[in-house]
Structures are given as structure tokens and as C-alpha cells.
Image (cartoon, grey):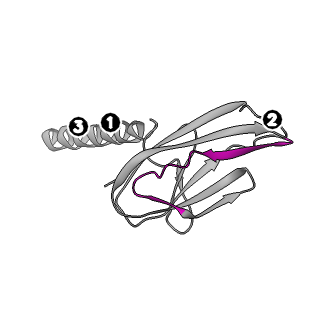
Amino acid sequence: MPGRRAIATLVATLAIGASAIVAGCGSGSTGPVTTAADGRGVYDEAHNVIRLAPGPKFIIRMPDPGEGSEWRLMGTSPVGGVSLAGMQQANGGGDWNFDTIGAGSGVLEFQKFAAGADDPDETMTFEVEIK
């Protein structure tokens, strides 16, 4: 029956189109770039908006700072919903691991410093919202 075949073709076309639209939605700066083996979301400079419920841990993956340079997490004011007390970092680059606690929001600011420099070469920020 040609009517059923036309409907099936239309449904398949719409499903493919919807899949392409959904796939395109993740290409912005929100949401993790990937997920670690243990389920933690991994964020980077292109995916710098972190929105989570309290409880899960997350990773910020900083780019290689280059020979003699390191990334530093700046500021002493707490970012609501994120625990900095147990934060682990990877020698100025690589993965920085964070825990979420309660609700809150703020900005995690990283600055890249060359060895012995007082002023940063680069600044990178991550918007965090835990609710």
C-alpha cells in the first residue's frame, strides 16, 4: 500500500531530522564535552557552563599550559555549591576535580602564569550553577 510506505518514509525522515537537531544542541558551551569512566562530566574551555544538581562531582580539563607555565585557580571567595576544600589538581594543567555541595552559583577563574611571572598570560572562566 503506497499510503503506508509514504507514512513510513515520512516518519523515518522526521526521525533523522530530529536526531540531527538534537545532536547539534550539544555543540554549545553548556554541558560536558565528555563523560569520565566513573560518570563525572568533563568540561573544557569550549564547554565552560556547568549546571548540575547537588551531589555529583565534575572535572575541569585545562589545556597543557606549556613548558614552565601553570594554571592556577584564582580567588579566595567560595563558589556556592562547589567544595574547594578537597579539590585535586593536576600540576597546573590536566584534570581538576571538584565536588558539589548544596545549591549555589559563581565563577571559577583560572589564570595561566609563566614561571616567575607576576601577571597572567591567559584567563579562563567557568560559570557554575548548582541547583
Q: Position of residue 87 (x, y in %)?
A: 59, 62
In the picture of the structure, the residue carrying the numbered disc 3 is: 10
Q: Residue at x 20, y 37 (%)?
A: 6
Q: Nearer the viewer, residue 115 or 29?
A: 115
Q: Is residue 73 above or below residue 59?
A: above
- Crowding around mark 1 (Cα neighbors within 10 Å: few <14, some 14 to 19, many 20+) is few
Residue holding disc 2: 117
Crowding at mark 3 (Cα within 10 Å: few <14, some 14-19, many 20+): few
* Residue at x 68%, y 31% (from the top left corner): 122
Amino acid at circle 2: Ala
The magenta region covers 67-84
Q: Secondary structure at mark 1?
A: helix
Looking at the image, tell me whether mark 3 or mark 2 is earlier in sequence order: 3
Q: Mark 3 or 2, which is nearer the eye?
A: 2
Residue for badge 1: 17
Report if residue 129 is visible in the image. Answer: no
Q: Amino acid at mark 3?
A: Leu
Give coordinates of residue 104: x percent, y percent: 35, 53
In the image, is residue 13 above or below residue 50?
A: above
**Earlier residue among tags 3 and 1:** 3
* Residue 41 horizontal/vertical position (percent): 49, 57
- Asked if residue 7 is among those painted magenta in the image, a careful observer would answer no
Q: Badge 2: few (under 14), some or many (20 or more) residues near its Cα, within 10 Å?
A: few
Residue nearest the viewer, comparing 113 with 67: 113
User: In whole angstroms, how far apart are the C-alphas of marks 2 and 1?
Assistant: 51 Å
Residue at 69% over, 43% down: 63
- The CA distance from mark 3 to mark 1 is 10 Å
- Measured Cα–Cα span from mark 3 to mark 2: 62 Å
**Considering the numbered disc 2 on the image, is that residue within a helix, a strand or a loop?**
loop
Q: Image check: 1 left or right of 50?
A: left
Residue 130 % position (x, y): 36, 54
Nearer the observer: mark 3 or 1; the answer is 1
